[in-house]
Amino acid sequence: MLTRCQVERFTDKHIEILKIFADQAVIAIQNVRLFTEIQKKSRQLEIARDEVQALNKDLEAKVAAQVGELERVGRLRRFLAPQLPGHRLSGR
């Protein structure tokens, strides 16, 4: 017991127990700091992930538009080629 009615020296056993409690308190404080840091980093990663997903979605839309444009150009080239036999259409 660490509370007393009279003043006495702490025994070596009591001092050892207090040191163990202090060590455990330091570990608990460090764990809270690390846990808080991990939560912050996790939120930052979630934000970055959302930004990357938005950029990917935009890029996919642009790629789809370009593919559509290339398909239209290909169809136009095939349509015009027989109508312009003396002209070479640039491209493939």
Image (cartoon, rainbow, N blue to C red):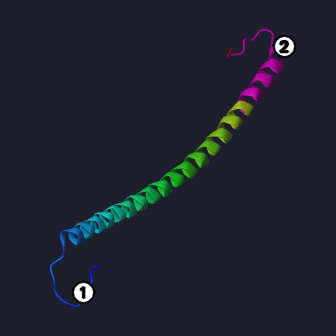
- Badge 2 density bin: few <14, some 14–19, many ≥20, Cα 10 Å: few
Residue 7 vs residue 76: left or right?
A: left
Question: Circle 1 sits on which residue?
Answer: 4
Which quadrant of the figure contains the N terminus?
Answer: bottom left
Q: Position of residue 23 (x, y in %)?
A: 28, 63
Main SS of the magenta part reads helix
Sequence-first tag of 2 and 1: 1
Q: Is residue 77 magenta?
A: yes
Question: Circle 2 sits on which residue?
Answer: 82
Number of the front mark, 2 or 1 = 1
Residue 57 vs residue 41: left or right?
A: right
Magenta stretch bounds:
69-90
Q: Position of residue 63 (x, y in %)?
A: 66, 35
Which quadrant of the figure contains the C terminus?
Answer: top right
Q: Residue at x 68, y 41 (%)?
A: 61
| Amino acid type indicated by mark 2 | Pro
Viewer-proximal residue among 78 and 25: 25
Residue 5 sits above or below residue 65 on the image: below
Quarter of the figure with residue 25: bottom left
| Amino acid type indicated by mark 1 | Arg
Quarter of the figure with residue 70: top right
Viewer-proximal residue among 13 and 83: 13
